[in-house]
Every structure is written in C-alpha cells, then in structure tokens.
Image (cartoon, rainbow, N blue to C red):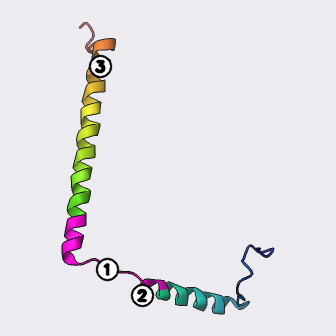
Amino acid sequence: MTDADGSSGGGSRPKNPFARIWLFLKQVFDELRKVIVPTRRELLNYTLVVLFFVLIVIGIVSGLDWIFSNAADLIFGGGAGPE
C-alpha cells in the first residue's frame, strides 16, 4: 500500500531535506559497490561485438536506401528535366 505522497509504507523517510539527500547519496554509493567492472578482454570483446553489429546495420540501411532510391528513379523518372 502506498501513502498519499506515493511512498511505500515499508520504511520511514527523513523529513529533513539534507537527511534525504544524504540518504540518497548513501544508497547511490551502496549500489555502486555492487557494480562489476569488466576485464580488459571482456571490454574489448563487447566493443568488437557492438562495432560488428553497427556495421551490419549500416550495410542493411545503405542497401535499403540504394534499393528505394533506384525504385523511386524507375517510378518517377531520373529527375533530369529537358534543357
């Protein structure tokens, strides 16, 4: 069940704004302690995987752009008017 201010009834919230900021910062640092930093090898592997898939998406988008551009030229003409 939630209170009128939207907080859950599980714990008491400090009323002092500085105490609330301190609590927030304490919780941030507690969460940062849980972060697992990847090793250099893992980071390199993840980076290469991302770059590979970005290149695949670039190829797909470029191919579709070329196909649609040629289709538009066939349907609407080359665009070069009489001079």
Residue stretch rendered in magenta on the structure: 31-46
Mark 2: amino acid: Arg
Q: Which residue in the structure is indicated by mark 2?
A: 33
Q: To which residue does mark 1 refer?
A: 37
**Mark on residue 51?**
none
Does 70 sit above or below residue 30?
A: above
Residue 15, how many percent across, how many down? 74, 89
Measure how far apart labels 3 and 2 are at the Cα level.
Answer: 55 Å
- What residue is rendered at 29% in x and 32% in y? 64
Q: Is residue 35 above or below residue 82?
A: below
Q: CA distance from mark 1 to mark 2?
A: 10 Å
Q: With 64 as the anchor, is 13 left or right in this view? A: right
Q: Which residue is mark 3?
A: 71
Measured as percent of width and height from the top left, residue 65 is found at 29, 31
Task: Please tell me how crowded label 2 is: few (under 14), some (14-19), or many (20+) other residues with Cα within 10 Å.
Answer: few
In the picture, the quarter occupied by the C terminus is top left
